[in-house]
Image: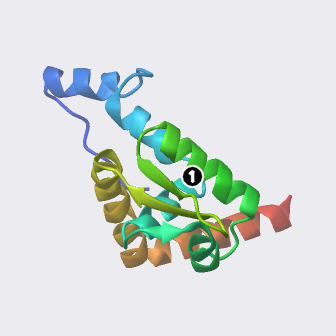
Amino acid sequence: MADHPHPSDPQETSVDEAVFHERYPSRRLLDLIASRWTPIVLFCLASGTHHYGQMQRRIPGISKKMLSQTLRRLETDGLVHREVYRVVPPKTEYELTELGWRLHEPVRFLCRWAAENAEIFDRIERNRTVASVSE
């Protein structure tokens, strides 16, 4: 196992300790994007305004219930704007707000990092498979 350097600077140590506090910004970020679908919906909306049906077709595996819950939460959080048009049939569009765009930045970075490091996830899945077989 690789050795990781320990911080020798007391100031750096206090920053590291702060990570454990529940109001620390990185924990709050992870709380926002920890849902399986939140980052994917944000990523989808970053390509422009979408109708509900467009998003459901574009995001494989998401149920209507999960898409609705995710959009509702993102709207409540102020990350997504929902525009309802009073026409027949009803038409609803979703787009990122300014806050949504700001949150999309780290999500985009994580998605790119994940794509560039797919072998890490392959190894983790193999480890889990081996562990489940040996249990």
In which quadrant is the N terminus drawn? bottom left
Toward the viewer: 14 or 78? Answer: 78
Residue that appears at 66% across and 73% down: 126
Q: Which residue is mark 1?
A: 71
Residue 30 image-quadrant placement = top left
Name the amino acid type tagged 1: Leu
| Residue 43 image offset from top left, x and y in percent | 43, 66
Left-right relation of 124 to 110: right
Looking at the picture, how far across and down is residue 45, in whole percent? 43, 65
Query: Of 8 and 83, which appears nearest the observer?
Result: 83
Q: Residue at x 46, y 37 (%)?
A: 77
> Where is residue 25 shown, x and y percent of the image?
33, 32
Tell me the residue at 74%/69% (across/down). 130
- Name the image quarter holding residue 87: bottom right
Against 62, residue 78 (above or below) is above
Q: Is residue 27 above or below residue 44?
A: above
